[in-house]
Image (cartoon, rainbow, N blue to C red):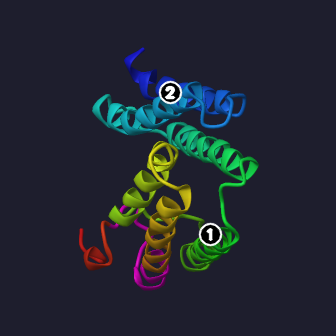
Amino acid sequence: MKKHLANIVSLSRVAGAVILFCCKNLSKTFLAVYIFCGFTDLIDGPIARKTNSTSTLGATLDTVGDVLTYLALTKILILRKLVPGWILAWILSAGAVFGVCTFISKKRFSKFYLPHTYLGKIFGGAVFVLPIAMQFMPGYVWMSVICSVASVHSLELVYIQSKNDEAKDFVPTVFHMGKA
């Protein structure tokens, strides 16, 4: 059982993310399930490492959970028309740069990958906080913060993908490239 615990946690996030699609926009239920998804995202990796049960399946479940959670959030933001046009253009621009990164990695390393960085973690945290922050401030204010971090992060990834000699899964910052 201990060997499968991390995958069970990841699967619970996938199930929670599916439930998010059925919740009323930014309702208390949505926020509770969303926070549950965030919590499980924080603990599945450490559980896998602690129980020595990291796996390709676990990494895939983690990614599926992340994508579904953020798709549910995107659905809410678009349906409530909470994303101004200029923010949407900014998001699409940053997304295009992320796309370029994946193609750089495919060409240079024969696989699609995006290294994990501290800025990436800050970006993920900022996105996660969005529906909670929207309870206290206009959404476009926090979305501007998210887009700023995403822009810098996407440029960081292009630099890392272009200059790194190998496809490392974790490169803390551009200042750590090439270090073990």
Q: Please identify the quarter of the rendering in which residue 19 is found.
A: top right
Give the extent of the magenta segment: 157-171
Viewer-nearest residue: 84 or 59: 84
The outermost residue toward the top is 1
Q: Residues within 10 Å of mark 2 (few under 14, many from 20)?
A: some
Q: Which mark is residue 32?
A: 2
Horizontal side, residue 24 vs residue 94: left or right: right
Q: Residue at x 60, y 41 (%)?
A: 69
Viewer-nearest residue: 79 or 40: 79
Q: For the residue marked with disc 2, what is the amino acid?
A: Ala
The image position of residue 131, as x and y in percent, is: 52, 44
The image position of residue 104, as x and y in percent, is: 58, 79
Q: Quadrant of the C terminus?
A: bottom left
Q: For the residue marked with disc 1, what is the amino acid?
A: Ile
Does the stretch in magenta take in 161? yes
Does the stretch in magenta take in 14? no
Q: Which residue in the structure is indicated by mark 1?
A: 87
Q: Please identify the quarter of the rendering in which residue 178 is found.
A: bottom left
The correct choice, above or below, for 9 with respect to 1 in the image is below
The correct choice, above or below, for 129 with respect to 166 in the image is above
**What's the distance in space between the residues labelled 2 and 1, CA to CA?**
26 Å
Mark 2 / mark 1, whichever is N-terminal: 2
Q: Residue at x 49, y 63 (%)?
A: 141
The image position of residue 4, as x and y in percent, is: 46, 22
